[in-house]
Amino acid sequence: MPNHHLSIVLGLTATAAVCLPLPVQAASFNFDSLPNISSRPIESNHKLNFFGDPSQNQGYTAFFKLPLFSDCSYQEISKNSPGNPAPCYTTGRPRSPEEPASGATRSATLNDGIGFSNFFSYLTHNTIPLNSIGFSYGQKSDRDFTDTWSLGAGVPGQDWFASEDSTLEERIYQANPDDVEIVMTYGTSPLINFGYSPIYTVFDYGATTQTDDDFEAGFTEPVNASKVAGLNPLAAGLADAFLQDVALGGGSVQLFIEDRGIEDVNLTTGNGYNVIRLPFPASLRAVPSVAVPEPASGLGLLLLGALGAVFHRKKQRHNQVQ
């Protein structure tokens, strides 16, 4: 990591460094231009928007073993990229390897949304605040850190797709479906389980080496949603309301994240890993079960927030950490 960022990494919170978006100059990205990832974000009139701030003990982490390239060998090569090593793993703060343990109970908190009329009506009728609803993902609590979503061996043409002649880069983070979970929570308790999907990440490094013309996104395939067993009557009713809206929206749920030109990250260590703690703006969309590519003009700016490492990297080069 560049020396001029060490004061942020070692002693200060990342909020000022990562949560303020730079002026957006990049055009909306055309996902139909992706040559290797076949899945596409799907527009929806039913969206729940979440945000997790590391300063509030939320967000997600991207991490890799030390020394660098000991577990995966990927390094950015695309035109106008900074040439950083890519983190091998990603997980939510509740499953982070950082030390001391974060003690986090969620990755993000519900801020607002559109559609989901049954869900929001149930919240209002039962005086349930929005901030009682959370979202998390990562390896299950009894699994090893490396059982989370990973970049694999960083094999060109398999886990990542990039060329020195193109500003476009695609990465696929995958896991054993039995080892990981994606959940929506009520308080600290799981409410809805979501099915497994790879996490697809897309980068367009723009026409320059600056960050303000970059585009980055992460998304899943449409997945099933199911009510957690053994809920009390209030929570069960809330889960049912959510599932009713998912059915109205097409029957499946897709996670979508979008980021443009955001800067630095917050680095710590733990359990033999370098750990990057990151804000997590996320949208859950109710979508059809079969993915249909959406027009590029329909995407717009779903979320302006801060990501990093997996869905974000800086336009400065890392010093290798050994």
Image: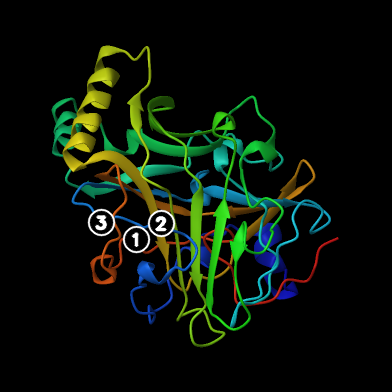
Residue at 25 percent across and 13 percent down: it is: 233
Q: Nearer the viewer, mark 3 or mark 1?
A: 3
Q: Quadrant of residue 319?
A: bottom right
Q: Which residue is mark 3?
A: 43
Q: Position of residue 42 (x, y in %)?
A: 29, 55
Q: Which residue is mark 1?
A: 303
Q: Relative to 318, is 126 on the left or the right?
A: left
Indicate the secondary structure of the residue bearing disc 3. Answer: loop
- Tag 2's secondary structure? strand
Check disc 1 and report its element: helix, strand or loop: loop
Vertically, is 192 above or below 48?
A: above
State the residue at coordinates (27%, 62%). 294
Which residue is outermost to the bottom? 208
Along the polypeptide, which appears first: circle 3 or circle 1? 3
Q: Which mark is residue 259?
A: none
Q: Position of residue 215 (x, y in %)?
A: 44, 72
Of 81 and 13, nearer the camera is 81
**Residue in the foreground of this view, choosing between 262 and 218:** 218
Q: Amino acid at mark 2?
A: Ile
Q: Assign the N terminus to one quadrant of the image.
A: bottom right
Q: Position of residue 9 (x, y in %)?
A: 68, 61
Does any portion of residue 101 appear in the rendered image? Answer: no
Q: Are marks 1 and 2 in contact (CB under 8 Å)?
A: yes
Which of the numbered marks, if any, corresponds to residue 257?
2
Display colour scheme: rainbow
10 Å neighbourhood of mark 2: few (<14), some, or many (≥20)? Answer: many
Q: Does residue 257 appear to the left or right of 156 in the view shown?
A: left
Give the mark nearer the N terminus: 2 vs 3. 3
Is any atom of residue 136 visible in this view?
Answer: yes
- The answer for how far apart the CA atoms under marks 1 and 2 are is 7 Å
